[in-house]
Amino acid sequence: MEERNKLILLYDYYKELLNDSQKEYFEAYYFDNLSLAEIAEKSNVSRNAVHKQIKSSIEKLEFFEEKLNIINKHNEIKKELEKIRDENIKQRITEIIES
């Protein structure tokens, strides 16, 4: 379950860097819980084609995070944010990082 959550988080951050079919298949598989066969039938492609696109998506998402490290940086900022006592500053920084 943890790997699935990690992939969904990566997708939330980097989905705009994937092509349309990668997004479609990833969402169908991870958000709609469709099987590879169901996605293939719906998209009129082979099960293997769906599998390859999802695998390629995962590799790209992991590559993006490895190079850009955005999720780790976001988590570090959130930890530091907890140390700030001024609620107005804390709220403004939270708004900035969540937009």
Image (spheres, rainbow, N blue to C red):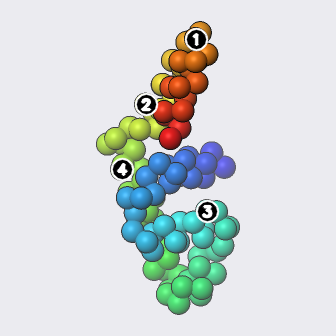
| Residue 30 circle label | 3
Q: Label 2: how many residues lie within 10 Å, few (<14), some (14-19) or many (20+)?
A: few
Q: Nearer the viewer, mark 2 or mark 3?
A: 2
Find residue 38 and report its horizontal and vertical position in percent: 64, 81
Q: Write down the quadrant of residue 49 in the picture.
A: bottom left
Residue at image mark 2: 73
Please tell me which of labels 2 and 1 falls first in the chain.
2
Residue at image mark 4: 63
Asked whether the viewer can see residue 56, the reply is yes
Q: Nearer the viewer, mark 2 or mark 4?
A: 2
The residue at 66%/73% (across/down) is 34
Q: Nearer the viewer, residue 78 or 28?
A: 78
> As shown in the figure, which amino acid type bears the numbered disc 2?
Lys
> As shown in the figure, which amino acid type bears the numbered disc 1?
Asp
Please tell me which of labels 4 and 3 falls first in the chain.
3
Query: What is the secondary structure assignment of the residue under circle 3?
Result: helix
Residue at image mark 1: 86
Find residue 21 and report its horizontal and vertical position in percent: 45, 74
Please tell me which of labels 2 and 3 falls first in the chain.
3
Please tell me which of labels 4 and 1 falls first in the chain.
4
Find residue 10 and report its horizontal and vertical position in percent: 49, 49
Find residue 11 and report its horizontal and vertical position in percent: 50, 54
Q: Is residue 59 left or right of residue 1?
A: left
> Please, which residue is most extreme toward the front here?
88
Up-down relation of residue 74 to residue 27 (above or below): above
